[in-house]
Amino acid sequence: MQQRNIFAGPYLDRAAHLRQDPAWFAAALADERSRAIPLWNSRNLIAEGDTPRAVYLELSRLPAERLNGTDLILLGRFGDTSFFTYEIESIEAPRVLPGTRFEDLRLVASLLPIDEAGLLGYARALISWRRRHRFCGTCGAKTVAAKSGHVLVCSDPSCRHEQFPRIDPAIIVLVSDGERALLGRQASWPIGRYSTIAGFVEPGESLEDAVAREVVEETGIEVDRIEYHSSQPWPFPASLMLGFTAHALTSEVHLRDQELEDARWFSRADIASTGDLLPPRQSISFRLIEHWFDAGGDARLRDIQGSGPWSSSR
């Protein structure tokens, strides 16, 4: 079994069968083992130290008026512990426990245990969805939470439209001609940073069609032999990255849609000598580059760049 991508994996039982059980929900709120994951300004609460860890709050630390199915979203169960998440809505940073801070998950995910990173990413994605769907997309009335926070229902009795959490599928692909990999860079990235080609899937399009279209739109390279590699939830705010490899049919790069500032071919020797300019290791783009690099020789990319399983190249 290949190593799973960060934010992915069976890190908890999502307990979907319990979301419509108000008696169970009430019992979970009363259970002293239950924990809550707070978010503020799209940031997670992290314990400071040499090894950052996620902070899970006892429900007794929450204001009593927030202990309900409107404010709390059930994430699921890990062992005998029920996990919820909620948003702190304030302009000013809220008071936190000593030795903790609210931090952007993208900056600390690679330093967290992989299960904790997945749980915090799940919480962030649901809070982001709730914030963006406060009103009904059909009639404009306010929405109210149902099914332990996993459904938003229109409050207008004549509408009652239901909204469910959504994800945006995006392809990401390592294109190779065998000895070289095609990488591109956006102008907003750190100087010298290159990564794999990526883009969102459009309506009426298969994943394979999206791979071929995005590559030719961004680089002018035509591809075949498109093969699935792995996927990665990317809760910033709500993407699912679907990783592929593809074989290049052409070699001359043409930047067609101006999405990229530059795109070029890299040999394994190029990548070995410029590893600090690769995408962060918690990203599926690094995993795709690593997969291609390791398949073509005796050296492993992680051995060249360091052995930390989730350390970040910055």
Image (cartoon, helix red, strand yellow):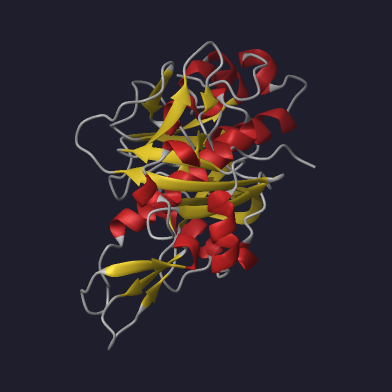
Q: For the point 55% across and 14% down, which residue is it?
A: 273
* Residue 197: percent from left, percent from top: 46, 43
Image quadrant assignment for residue 192: top left
Q: For the point 57% across and 40% down, which residue is it?
A: 118
- Residue placed farthest to the top in the image? 50
Is residue 83 visible in the rendered structure shown here? yes
Q: Nearer the viewer, residue 114 or 186?
A: 114
* Direction from residue 153 to residue 136 in the image, left or right: left
Labels in figure, total: 0
Q: For the point 42% across and 51% down, which residue is it?
A: 67
Q: In which quarter of the image is the C terminus?
A: top left
Q: Which of 132 and 244 is in front in this view?
A: 132
Q: For the point 64% across and 50% down, which residue is it?
A: 77
* Residue 123: percent from left, percent from top: 47, 46
* Residue 106: percent from left, percent from top: 44, 32
Image quadrant assignment for residue 143: bottom left
Measured along the vertical axis of the image, is residue 41 above or below residue 228? Answer: above
Measured along the vertical axis of the image, is residue 68 above or below residue 198? Answer: below
Q: Quadrant of the N terminus?
A: top right
* Direction from residue 60 to residue 191 in the image, left or right: left
Image quadrant assignment for residue 45: top left
Measured along the vertical axis of the image, is residue 182 above or below residue 158? Answer: above
* Direction from residue 238 to residue 141 in the image, left or right: left
Is residue 179 visible in the rendered structure shown here? no
* Residue 306: percent from left, percent from top: 64, 13
